[in-house]
Amino acid sequence: MTETPRDNDVLLTRGQARKAERERRRQAKDAAYEERLARKRSKDVQFWHGHHVVDAKTLAAAFPEPETPEYESGTVRRRITHAVTLVLLLALVVTGVVLAGMVQRGQLELNFSFPKTASASAICPSETLKYPANKTVTVNVLNAGSHEGMAGKVAAELKKRGYKVKDVSNGVTAYAAPVVIVSGPSGHAAAFNLQHNVAGSDYVQDDRTDASVDFIMTGEYTSLVEADKVSKKSGKLSCPHLTPAPSKSAAAPKKAPAPPAK
């Protein structure tokens, strides 16, 4: 079958189109090659061996820094409150550590017990008492003065003398004496013993049922009587606060004037 002129025209047109497409691709490839060569020869610092160099300005443009966020006033207040709370907690922890160290070293004495209610007897016990052995006496050493650490020092000295020291803490007293000795009716002998170990003490009786004794030191306290000079003779308790102050003797009445002589 012979090709018609129309068919020849169509084939020619297709061949030319393919040739033109190949030529276009070759030219594009040559143009790209020439561009790479030009970049290599170029002194532009933005290109290195035909590759684009990314600088800080380009990075900043591609990845801009986020803007500073603006918080609401409520958020700011909460953050400030949290910061202040953390600072206060830290201060409390530091204070607790310092106080614990002071207590451990004996520089500070803490008393968490309620003071005992003393109901003083209106009459000083009058029985004659024998001096009991120190080891039979249970004593609570209380500091009612302004000298810190005094209770611990006196408690250590009493332990050396054989006393059973139970509580060592701060205390209060309404009586004016270097040391106030307090006990219940069962502790008269123990209180008598302790009165001999300190000069100028005052005895007060309360309603406790055991034989323990409170040794309360005031700001007038100085020291204990030396151990080898403590009198162990029998005697009575001393209650200066119940002893009335000596009253002035009444003045002698004036004599009536003698009647005039008649």
Image (cartoon, helix red, strand yellow):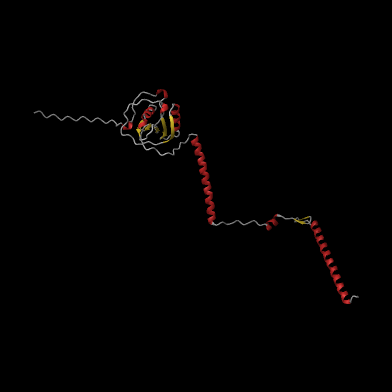
Q: Residue furthest left?
A: 262
Q: Nearer the viewer, residue 249 or 24?
A: 24
Residue 261 in picture, x, y percent from top left: 10, 28
Residue 185 appears left or right of 36: left
Name above or below for residue 204 compared with residue 30.
above
- Looking at the image, which residue is at 51% across and 39% down? 98
Residue 72 falls in which quadrant of the image? bottom right
Residue 158 in picture, x, y percent from top left: 43, 28
Residue 68 falls in which quadrant of the image? bottom right
Name above or below for residue 23 compared with residue 116.
below
Name above or below for residue 95 compared with residue 244.
below
Residue 111 appears left or right of 236: right
Q: Total marks drawn?
A: 0
Residue 130 in picture, x, y percent from top left: 36, 25
Q: Nearer the viewer, residue 236 or 97?
A: 236
Q: Residue furthest bottom?
A: 5
- Looking at the image, which residue is at 87% across and 72% down? 11
Q: Residue furthest right?
A: 2
Quadrant housing the N terminus: bottom right
- Looking at the image, which residue is at 43% across and 30% down? 164
Q: Nearer the viewer, residue 262 or 7?
A: 7
Name above or below for residue 85 compared with residue 258.
below
Quadrant housing the C terminus: top left
Residue 186 in picture, x, y percent from top left: 36, 31
